[in-house]
Image: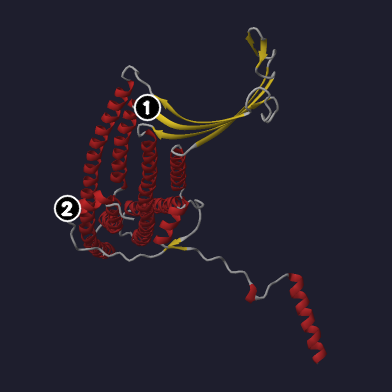
Amino acid sequence: MRARLTILTIILLAGSLLSGSKPAATAERPPQTRLLTLETAISETLANHPLRQAALEQQLAAKAAHTAVTAELLPRLSTSYYYFRLHDQPYFRINPVGKVPYSDKDVNIWSIQAVQPLFTGLRLTTRSKMAGLELEGKKLAREQLSLDLVKNTKLAYYQIFLAQKHLLVARKTVSDLKLHESDTLALYKQGIVAYNDLLQARVALAQARRLEQGAKRDLEISRARLNLLMNHDIEADFEVEKIKIEIGDGGHDLKPLFTEALSRRPEIKHLEIKLEEAGMAVTLARGEFYPTVSLVGTYQQVGDNFGGGHNSYMNSDTTAVGIMADWTIFEWGKTRARTRAQQHRQQALKKQLEAVANRIRLEVKTAVSDLKLARVNTRTAEAAVDQAEENYRMTNLQYQQQMANSTTLLDAATFLERSRNNYYDSLYGYLMARAELERALGRR
């Protein structure tokens, strides 16, 4: 008996191996769908979005430019080499001696020169400061882009929830109209309702199915939009984490919000830097009125061999230290015109800064008003949904008892669908309005 069991066991194991089947414990499990939180979506957008990476490259380029301009304040060292082969040996004619040579035919000249700027009319120091301001401007531009990306990520995240709710409403409407079409068909077969009532029910059901397909399309586009913000594959699969929506009751005092926005918004800080940079540009233009003075040190070797170390007629090496000055005396008013041009640009930036400040105040005012409106609409729409559901329930009962016609029931279904969508539009519109306010205030 034991021998038979052993043989049977071997046969079963061999069959299992030949069939390639796997034990149930080691079977492959389907991959789980990724759960995406809002914080994770924002982090991945800031880390991966191409425009933010491009802004970082521009910031690094401005940093390198600042380093290059600052280097102009330091000593500049250069070297040069010249070789000449003279056709005739040069000489002096001295009477009564005659021709006296003073150089070989082969001439090798090595030269090393160091130049340290001493005074440039503040041009070099001003250019260095302007390059530093340009670097700060690129940082602020990147921060401004980050604020926009954070807001757009929030809006895309909330839009997915809104699209999901619209799809649920569309599916519920299809389900309700299927029941209505079934009830109407039964009443038609009993001769209680006319054929056009059945046609109305079927047309309404077809329309509801069309709207359901549109809601599916909107959900797909919303998911694709968020994927592209995070720089993921456009069809990457994920699920958004459920969020708890709390409708605030408190109001918003505009004056402190204006103050916060004007102190935080990168646009204001960037224009202030541009205004400071324009003031330096005036100083830079005026610097053309002054001379440029540099300290120069030179070492030179001249000889008949490659290294210039051998010279039969003079000393082979020479060292010199001196001052070099360069001053343009007259340029037909070009420097004065450049100075005036920079002064006008400075005044233009002041007016631009004033206009941007007014625009930011309007953005804050609009965002606060939209938030208040969304809060009121959400409460109103919530009550409207309850009333629309009760109205549809009563109308459906009346239709089944032939106390209401098909048109009245379909109108009630349409009203219910619109009320549900309006509620979700207001509910998630509140979150979107809050995101717009946070962006208007310059908050991350």
Q: Residue at x 32, y 36 (%)?
A: 280
Left or right, 4 with reference to 111:
right
Residue kind at label 2, given as amino acid type: Lys
Picture quarter with the N terminus: bottom right
Q: Which mark is residue 291?
A: 1
Q: Residue furthest top?
A: 96
> Please, is residue 179 above or below residue 199 in the view?
below
The residue lying toward the viewer, choosing from 194 and 219, is 219
> Please, is residue 68 above or below residue 386 in the view?
above
Give the percent coordinates (x, y) of residue 17: 75, 73
> Please, is residue 431 above or below residue 286 in the view?
below
Q: Residue furthest front?
A: 96
Residue 185, picture quadrant: bottom left
The residue lying toward the viewer, choosing from 188 and 343, is 343
The residue lying toward the viewer, choosing from 362 and 12, is 362
Give the percent coordinates (x, y) of residue 173: 35, 58
> Mark 1: which secondary structure?
loop
Give the percent coordinates (x, y) of residue 69: 44, 38
Q: Which mark is residue 255?
A: 2
Residue 346, picture quadrant: top left
Residue 425 appears anywhere in the view? no
